[in-house]
């Protein structure tokens, strides 16, 4: 893993933490919406599972980004810096996995309504997933 400057990493963690908090709220709301409707199909279960995985992944990302920011603070205790790399890895992986799970859930959700809607949501989510992965792989 490439060593990043603490100031850069703190700014990045702040952005990822904020975005994760927002998207986690969206994923939780999306999950709650699907849980309220009484659909018991396999597609509904997959959509619910994807939304739950996304919401939890974003929560983990928020906590990891907070821990990373705290570990990199100039006045942090001496031992805090040791946890920075683990927090950075956890934040990054949970954010990307949660984002892909949310896109999966959005794509699968259309199939619970109709075949046409399913194709539409799946194609749009697929394009989003490809775009996200290409961006992440270019940066990493």
Image (cartoon, rainbow, N blue to C red):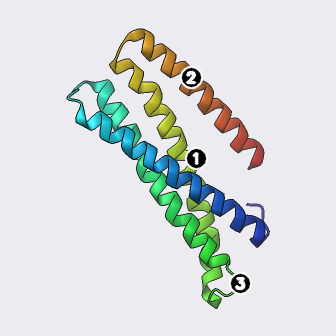
SS under mark 1: helix
Residue 94: x %, y % from top left:
53, 53
Q: Residue at x 49, y 21 (%)?
A: 121
Mark with earlier residue (2, 1) = 1
Q: Quadrant of residue 30?
A: top left
Residue at image mark 3: 74
Residue 50: x %, y % from top left:
40, 38
Position of 21 with respect to 69 (left or right) is: left
Q: Residue at x 63, y 72 (%)?
A: 69
Residue 103 shows in the view:
yes
Which is more foreground, mark 1 or mark 3?
Answer: 3
Q: Residue at x 43, y 16 (%)?
A: 118
Count neighbours of disc 1 (C-alpha within 10 A) and say few if under 14, some if 14 to 19, many if 20 or more: some
Residue at image mark 1: 96
Position of 48 with respect to 66 (left or right) is: left
**Distance from Cα at disc 2 to Cα at disc 3:** 43 Å
In this figure, what is the number of numbered marks? 3
Position of residue 71 relative to residue 37, above or below, is below
Residue 126: x %, y % from top left:
57, 25
Judging depth in this view, the residue of 17 and 57 nearest the camera is 17
Which is more foreground, mark 2 or mark 1?
Answer: 2
Residue at image mark 2: 124
Position of residue 96 relative to residue 83, above or below, is above
SS under mark 2: helix
Mark with earlier residue (1, 3) = 3
């Amino acid at each position: 893993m490439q060593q990043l400057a603490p100031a850069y990493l703190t700014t990045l963690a702040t952005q990822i933490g904020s975005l994760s908090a927002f998207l986690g709220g969206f994923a939780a709301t999306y999950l709650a919406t699907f849980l309220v409707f009484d659909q018991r199909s396999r597609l509904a279960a997959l959509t619910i599972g994807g939304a739950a995985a996304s919401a939890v992944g974003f929560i983990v990302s928020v906590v990891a980004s907070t821990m990373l920011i705290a570990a990199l603070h100039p006045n942090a205790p001496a031992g805090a810096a040791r946890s920075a790399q683990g927090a950075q890895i956890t934040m990054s992986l949970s954010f990307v996995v949660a984002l892909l799970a949310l896109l999966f859930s959005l794509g699968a959700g259309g199939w619970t309504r109709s075949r046409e809607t399913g194709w539409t949501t799946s194609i749009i989510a697929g394009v989003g997933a490809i775009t996200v992965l290409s961006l992440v792989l270019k940066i990493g």
